[in-house]
Image (cartoon, rainbow, N blue to C red):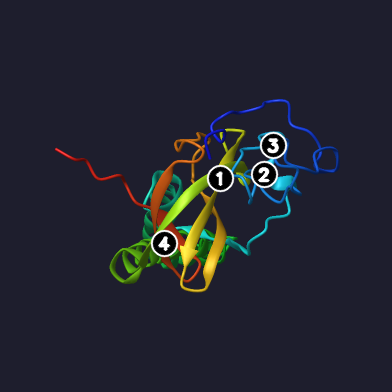
Amino acid sequence: MNDIRLNNKHKMRPEDVRNCPKCGAPILSEVCQFCGTYIGKVATSDLTPEYPVVECKLAKIGFWTVGFPLMFGGIFTCASIPFLFASDALEKADSPVSMKAFLIPFILIGLVSLGFALYRIFRTLQVKISGTQRSGVIYGYMDDTVAYNGVNGQKVKILVDTAEGKKFILLPLGTTSKPYEVNSAVDVRLLDKWAVILPKKTNW
């Protein structure tokens, strides 16, 4: 895979790039499955891969996955509960609107946000404790459906060796950056459809 790090920014439609420019094999992914040449002309999202593709969720505690839901849920819940206890006194004062009916939607939104964050924490710990470590290779990136400050987040495409054979996993990174070099080797911890890329070990 000596040519894989070359990056042709002028992406072409998949119907315009059908064969590897080096060996002539049909193109099924960013890297030729026969000679290892990096094609670099077709967008990752346009390719029909030669291996099964698994959409994974990121098992990582971050601001957008855990911090923001905790903060959002905490504000809604903590701000609403005191008014809920005070609603009886307000209603006895002949208030025209039931305070409980007004506050319930805010409390529910807060509880759902807190539940989402706690579930993400639970799954992250579960992957860390019970997940299986696999080796993989970064093949490319594609835009996620989630945007951060108006910019699409990135999904990374990784070819992973599993017990059932090679598979591609698409893993949202929760960021707009592309932190991993194409064709670089990474270690991935997997559990069901949750995954996380492990940090590289530092050799002293």
Q: N-terminal of the two: label 2 or label 1? A: 2
Sequence order check, earlier mark of 4 and 2: 2
Q: Nearer the viewer, mark 1 or mark 4?
A: 1
Q: Quickly name the residue at label 4.
A: 120
Q: In the displayed structure, does residue 22 sit left or right of residue 118? A: right
For the residue marked with disc 4, what is the amino acid?
Arg
Q: Nearer the viewer, mark 4 or mark 2?
A: 2
Label 3 sits on residue: 22
Q: Please, what is the three-letter code of the amino acid marked with disc 1?
A: Tyr
Q: Earlier in the sequence, mark 1 or mark 4?
A: 4
Q: Residue at x 44, y 41 (%)?
A: 184
Mark 2 Cα-neighbour bin, 10 Å: few <14, some 14–19, many ≥20: many
Q: Secondary structure at mark 3?
A: loop
Residue 174 in view here = yes
The residue that disc 1 covers is 139
Residue 16, compared with residue 119, is above or below; it is above
User: Could you tell me residue 203's position as x and y percent?
Assistant: 19, 40
**Label 2 belongs to which residue?**
44
Q: Earlier in the sequence, mark 3 or mark 1?
A: 3
**What's the CA distance linking mark 2 and mark 3?**
19 Å
Q: CA distance from mark 4 to mark 3?
A: 44 Å
Residues at circles 2 and 1 in contact by the CB criterion of under 8 Å: yes
In this view, the mark in front (4 or 3):
3
Spot occupied by residue 85 in the image (x, y as percentages of width and height): 38, 65
Q: Quadrant of residue 127?
A: bottom left
